[in-house]
Image (cartoon, rainbow, N blue to C red):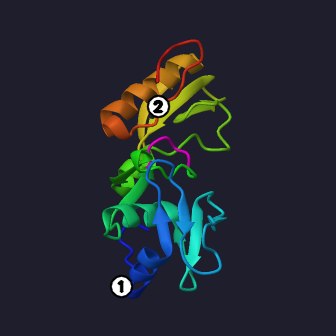
Amino acid sequence: MGAATIAKHVQEEMRRRLSYDKDTGAVIWVVGRKAGQQIFNKSCQGYLRLKIAGKNYYLHRVCWFLHHGEWPTEWIDHINGNKSDNRLENLRVVSSSQNSANRPLAVNNTTGYKGVVYRKAFNKYLVRVGANPRTIVGYFESLEEAARAYNEAAKELYGEYARLNNIQGTQEQ
């Protein structure tokens, strides 16, 4: 995904057939039987994509290309985490690590906080941040304390790319 390129003739087809509104994120077909329509499907990961020249392309990468004129060689991140929000202000070029830092909470996380798992054997919450290998931040008595510890570690590690826990009852983001 990060370093993939596309053929020049496909880039030319995209420029000829598609129009991108950077303020709304809409991609509209401008020629052919699809003219005036937004035609896309959703990948199993939840990203919007469109088919052109017989191949699917992620819509956020197409939007970046249509606006900047060059196919992205790095990852394109949705800043707000909404995979359907392809407004230019919501897209940014990132590294693989930065893209991972901005991932939302895993569906199977039972604590409700990113980077926090409950360890029954210790009757405490374990906080981990990073990937391969993950750094263990520590064990914490309360869920909120653990969520705050994750936020601090993630900010230190990822800076502006960190997706922080929204801790109940506080203004922390």
70 sits to left or right of 57: left
If the image is split into quadrants, where does the N terminus sit? bottom left
Name the spot of residue 145 as percent of width and height, x first.
Answer: 51, 17
Name the spot of residue 72 as percent of width and height, x first.
Answer: 34, 66
**Main secondary structure of the magenta stretch:** loop
Q: Is residue 131 visible?
A: no
- Which amino acid lies under the numbered mark 1 shown in the image of this protein? Lys
Reading the image, the residue beneath label 1 is 8
| Label whose residue precedes the other's in the sequence (2 or 1) | 1
146 sits to left or right of 134: right
Name the spot of residue 70 as percent of width and height, x first.
Answer: 31, 70
Res 164 label: 2
Q: Is residue 25 visible?
A: yes
Which segment did they paint magenta?
78-82
Q: Secondary structure at mark 1?
A: helix
Q: Secondary structure at mark 2?
A: loop
Q: Residue sitting at 51 percent across and 23 percent down?
A: 146
Q: Is residue 166 above or below residue 44?
A: above
